[in-house]
Structures are given as structure tokens and as C-alpha cells.
Image (spheres, rainbow, N blue to C red):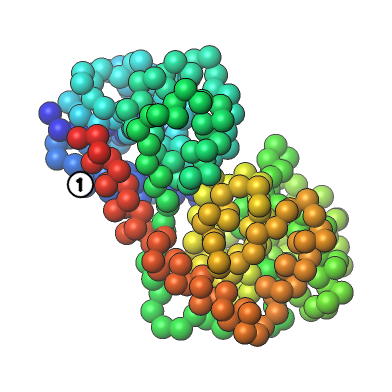
Amino acid sequence: MSGVLGLFPSFSGVGGVERSGRIAWNSVASAWSGEAHVICYGASVLPRDVTGGTVHHAGTQAMAVIRASSRKWPVRLILVWHIGMLKLLPFVRARGARVALFLHGIEAWRRPSQATAPLLRNVDLFLANSDFTWARFLEFHPELSGALHRTVHLGVGAPLGGAPAVPADPPSALMIGRIARSEGYKGHDAVIAAWPQVLERIPGARLRIIGPCDTRDELLARTADLQVEILGAVSEEEKERYLAECRVMALPSRGEGFGLVYPEAMRMGRPCIVSTADAGREVVGEAGLAVDPSAVAQLAPALVRTLTAGPEWDAWSQAARARYESRYTEKHFRDRLLSALAALL
């Protein structure tokens, strides 16, 4: 008995949990001997980049419970890709299996529900996407400070050949992240508030915002005459083009457990503006600037600096690409994950 069972929230979508989940599951399913099964929510049609194991779809919580309890699972490892999926553990029949839980971000930075809290005692290995996420998790679970834990930084893509693309003129800042009324932490309000000061210094500068948005009309009204483009959801090809054209990825979020968009930008040799309030500093390091997103007096000058060509920008660009290539490729992520899971077996 040497197989693996995955409990994943979804393989669809463009968020960090889903994208890293696809990479993680393919890696684990291909590396493990024995059977590989995964129970996940979402559409029955898999994304083309999910290739590993047997997928058991569950459109509802009740269906997920039925799937989990439908059989005995001949596995040694249960990989839970989101803390919310722990609720399936009591229904999984897999005698002797070890449990690894991956902690992604803000969903782990709060007190657990009464149903979830006792299930944390069944976890043999905690994986976190950043040291910041693990530290925040322990604020609510100090009793787990001695638990087996590994930080597994995420990664995406492969290094690009040749020199980085030359940013377009006029210079642009890019933001990638969903905009929802219920989630106001990504930093859009802060960047928009600082943008008039940016235009005073760089009159032609543009701000481009990519991602699903349920407040489009309000944003358009707020940003009239500010040279802000609300682009909504775009294809991967379009996203790559906008990354190549921009001078800076500006996402001073207050709630990133990691932030896959930062390595995506660094892969292109683009510096990033991150927040002092989350894991952005840990990921970006010297490849950009960290600011207090509530302080326009900090954010506006940071935007101006990263939009301005010259030796300082060139140094950031080189640092960004070097940091990505040495830490945050998809291969780095796969190797870190498999090495961490090997500690259980």
C-alpha cells in the first residue's frame, strides 16, 4: 500500500490555490508508486494541464462526502490542499495513512471553525507557502508550534531565454488580482488613490488592472481621466503581453500568503511593489519595494521610482529575474514539495 489520495478544493480557476494545486497534484501523482486518487470540487471537465491520477469530481459538499466514504483508499499519504478540505477526513477510510495539510494564506490566518479545529490534531505534516503564513497560522494555534512543518515556496513556469523584453512607452504599472466587494485587500484602492500623484511626476503613465471584477462601473467612475485601464479577465497570452509591456507589478496587497503574480512578473524581469503587511516582502526580496499600502506618501514615490528608466530600474530588473530563476520556477516548487512530503514516509 503506497498510493496517495488528494483532497483539493478545485482544479479550475486562475487563483494561486488552483494553479499551484494543478502543479502539485501532477507532481505527487507521477512521483508516487501505487494508486493516485484525488477528490475535488469543480467542473467535470479537467483543465488540460491536469494529467495525474484518477480524479473524482464533487459538485457539492454532500457529494464530496459520498466520494470520500465510498471505498477504502489503498494509500499511505493523504494530501489536503486547503484547510477547508479537512472536513472530509472523518469520512476517508485509509488505515495508517499519513496526512499533510498545505496552508495557503488568509483562510489559515483566522480561528478555525468548531468542525475544523479538532481535525488539525490529525495532521502529521503542515506545509506552508511562506514563513509568513506559518507564523500567522501559529498566532491562532500556538499549541501546534512544535508540529512537523516545512515551508514550501510556490513556483511557476520556466526561465525565459534571451534578454528580458523592453518595457513599452509610455510606462505602465500592472495589477493582477480579482476585485471583489467582499475582498478589498489586494491594494487596488491604495494604488488608485496614489495615481494622481504619479501622473503629476510622469504625465503619460498608465495603470492597467487585470482580473475578475464585480465593481467595474464603480472603478471606471473613480478612475475617469486617470489613464487607468480596467481590463477584466484576460487570456494567458494577453497577460504575458501586458507583463512584457509594464515596468512594474504593483500589488501592495495586505493578504498574500505568497502571491504567484510576483514570480510571474520577476520571470519577465519586472520589479514588484509589495506590502509590508503580508508575505510579499519574503517572496520579492531585493527585486522591488515594500510599502505600507495605507500610506499614499510611501506608495506614490515607490510607483514613480519603479516606473522610471535608469540604473536603479535596471538593477531591480536583473535582481527580479535572477531571484525567479534561482527560487521560483515550477521545478523548484515540485522539488520542494516532494522533498517535504518525503519526510512523512
Residue at point 62% right, 73% down? 246
Quarter of the picture containing the C terminus is: top left
Q: Quadrant of residue 21?
A: top left
Residue at point 64% right, 64% down? 289
Q: How many marks?
A: 1
**Mark 1 element type:** helix
| Residue 191 at x, y percent in the picture | 75, 59
Looking at the image, which is closer to me, 270 or 279? 279
Q: Does residue 163 appear in the picture of this structure?
A: yes
Q: Is residue 248 shown above or below 297?
A: below
Looking at the image, which is closer to me, 232 or 112? 112
| Residue 116 at x, y percent in the picture | 48, 19
Q: In the drawing, does residue 292 fall left or right of residue 76? A: right
User: Label 1: how many residues lie within 10 Å, few (<14), some (14-19) or many (20+)?
Assistant: few
Residue at point 21% right, 47% down? 30
Looking at the image, which is closer to me, 112 or 192? 112
Q: Going by the picture, which residue comes out furthest to the front?
A: 146
Quarter of the picture containing the N terminus is: top left
Q: In the drawing, does residue 142 fall left or right of residue 207? A: left
Amino acid, disc 1: Ala
| Residue 238 at x, y percent in the picture | 55, 67
